[in-house]
Image (cartoon, rainbow, N blue to C red):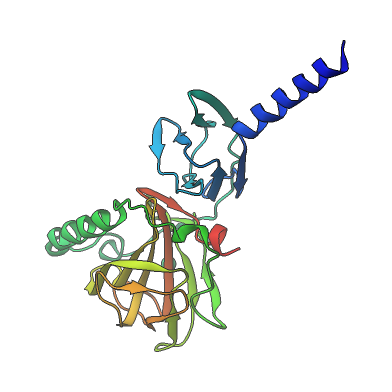
Amino acid sequence: MDSKIIKYILVIILISFKASAIEFNGKFIQGHFIIGKTDSNSKVKVDKTQVRVSKDGYFVFGISRDRKYDLVIAIEKDGIIKKIIKKVQKRKYNIQKIDGLEEKKVTPPEEVYERIKKENKLIAKARAIDTDLDFFKDKFIIPVDNAIITGVYGSQRILNGKPKWPHYGLDFAQKEGTEIKAMLNGIVTLAETDLYYTGGTVIFDHGHGISTLYMHMKDVFVQKGQKIKQGDIIGTVGSTGRATGAHLDIRLNWLDIRLDPATALN
Ligand SMILES: [Zn+2]
């Protein structure tokens, strides 16, 4: 073959590679937080859901705690669709069985059902916010200094034979009143001082459906709508709501999917 033709073919191959360039920062493991980077003006679907792509090509998604089937990412640019199929690696979670508990310790009293329902709606509404902010692509920082990790993502307790809601947070035990720093720039979408389960609670929007939640806070220093910078003091550690001892429990969500905060914090 003529060397000119070979060069021509090489250039075509290079151009077509460039057109569908994609990188992932994160692992395809249950519970993980993953940032994608592709060319600007691309359209991205994760499974069948179209996700936001920032002007500079960033998008974000996550993998649920118990996801078993493969993840399909479709990138469309200039009418060409490239499909990437990723296997999801499974994790083992800590399951703890406790029997012989008093029934009232296992189920909340009936008179608080309405309250819990109302508060769950408030939280769900804040988590459903999907804006074009792109704070999610920055590195998270640890929210409490010198804390001990006392609870991790995914663990579950089976009380008197009833499987309880898995623990989706990361717990930082520290003295009551210790300052809590914002892990990332964000906009406050919920700031409450007394929710039944979570007590003093703050939720931030970081863009593209990524939210973080801080709970059991003693003091809440921020207000809904406020723009917060990474490292700002947003409140203090407490044991408000249904908490056993002073600790900060943080959550990371991609819309209604609960992710492991440790995968964003390293
Ligand atoms: Zn917790």
Asked if residue 203 lies left or right of residue 5, the reply is left
Asked if residue 197 lies left or right of residue 90, the reply is left
Could you tell me which residue is drawn at 31 percent across and 61 percent down?
Answer: 106
Quarter containing the N terminus: top right
Asked if residue 120 lies left or right of residue 36, the reply is left
Total numbered labels: 0
Quarter containing the C terminus: bottom right
Q: Is residue 70 above or below residue 126?
A: above
Q: Is residue 159 above or below residue 236?
A: above
Of residues 72 and 163, the one drawn nearer to the viewer in this rendering = 72
Could you tell me which residue is drawn at 48 percent across and 36 percent down?
Answer: 42
Of residues 149 and 45, the one drawn nearer to the viewer in this rendering = 45
Question: Measured from the top left, where is residue 19 in percent x and y?
Answer: 60, 32
Of residues 14 and 228, the one drawn nearer to the viewer in this rendering = 14
Could you tell me which residue is drawn at 45 percent across and 48 percent down?
Answer: 55
Q: Is residue 59 above or below residue 96?
A: above
Question: Measured from the top left, where is residue 210 in percent x and y?
Answer: 40, 55
Could you tell me which residue is drawn at 35 percent across and 71 percent down?
Answer: 215
Q: Residue furthest top?
A: 1
Q: Residue furthest front?
A: 4
- Which quarter of the frame holds ligand 1? bottom left
Q: Quadrant of residue 199?
A: bottom left
Question: Measured from the top left, where is residue 10 in percent x and y?
Answer: 77, 24
